[in-house]
Image: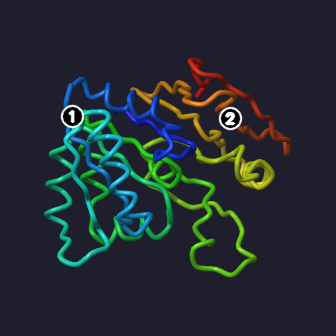
Amino acid sequence: MKVITIGGGEISELETLDLDAFICSQTGKSNPKALFIPTASGDADGYCKTFQRIYGDRLGCEVDFLLATGPGFSHQQAVQKILDCDLVYVGGGNTQRMLAIWRDFRIVEALRQAGERGTVLSGLSAGAICWYEAGLSDSDRFTADSNWKLKRLDALGFLPGVFCPHLDKEQRHAPLLELVRTSGERAIACDNGAAIYWQDGVAQVLTSLPNAYAYIYTEQSGEVSVERFSAGQKLPL
C-alpha cells in the first residue's frame, strides 16, 4: 500500500506542488485518474476548483470528485469512483465530521480495498490524519466556542500511530507532547510542507518547503523524546 500524508501547506499557492507531483508519479501513469474527496471542507467549491487547476491543468490528471455532502450521493456511486481511480487525495477541514460521513456511507472498506489494489492514497491535514490509527485534531474549532482544544481522534487505522499536522504553524507541539506523555502512544508529526511517504510499511520523509521536517514523539517512563527527520530520511518505525 502506498500512502502519502502531508502535514500542511497551501495547495493553491503551490506550497505542496513537489509533493503533489510525487503523488501523481507514484501511480506510474502519465495521465492518472485523480479522485478528490473534499468531505472535510463540506465539499467546498473553491477547493474543488483549486484541485482541478493543480492536479488537472498543471499535473495532467483526469480529475473526478467524490462529493459526499450533497443530495443524491450514494454508497454505490462512492465505491465505484474509489475503485476506478489511480490516486485518492483527501482534502483538509473537519476530520471528525468527515470520518462520520464516510462511516455512514460505508466507504471505508472501499478505500482500504483500493489501497491494497495499488491506488495511491494521499491527503493533507484532515486528509492525512484519516489514514492513521488516530490524529491530533482541531475538529472542535468548527462546532465549539472559542475555548475549543486540540483532541485525539480515532481514525481509519491504515497506518500506525497518532498523526499531527501543522506542527510548526499552529503551535501543536505542547498538546502533542501531553497526549503522548499521558497515552503512551507514538506520534508522527509534520510541519507544513513536509510529508510521510509510506510503502509496504517503510516510511520516508518528503518535503516541498525549506526547513520543513517530520518528527517522532515517543514516551518512555513518563518522559517524551522528540526526534527530527529531514527530507529523504526513513523513520525508524
- Give the camera-side residue of 56 and 157: 56
Q: Nearer the viewer, residue 96 or 41?
A: 41
The three-letter code of the residue at mark 2 reads: Ile
Q: Which residue does the numbered mark 1 point to in the structure image? A: 32
Relative to residue 28, is residue 66 depicted above or below?
below
Which residue is drawn at the image coordinates 24% and 43% (left, top)? 114
> How many angstroms separate mark 1 from mark 2 (CA)?
32 Å
Picture quadrant of residue 54: top left
Q: How many marks?
A: 2
* Residue occupying image coordinates x 14% and y 64%: 76
Q: Nearer the viewer, mark 1 or mark 2?
A: 1
Q: Position of residue 21 (x, y in %)?
A: 38, 29
**Residue 80 at x, y = what percent?**
14, 54
Relative to the observer, which residue lies in front, 176 or 56? Answer: 56
- For the C terminus, the image quarter is top right
Residue furthest bottom as drawn: 145
Q: Which residue is mark 2?
A: 216
Classify mark 1: residues with Cα within 10 Å, few (<14), some (14-19) or many (20+): many
Which residue is found at the position 64% from the left and 80% from the top? Answer: 144
* For marks 1 and 2 on the same chain, the one whose residue lies earlier in the sequence: 1
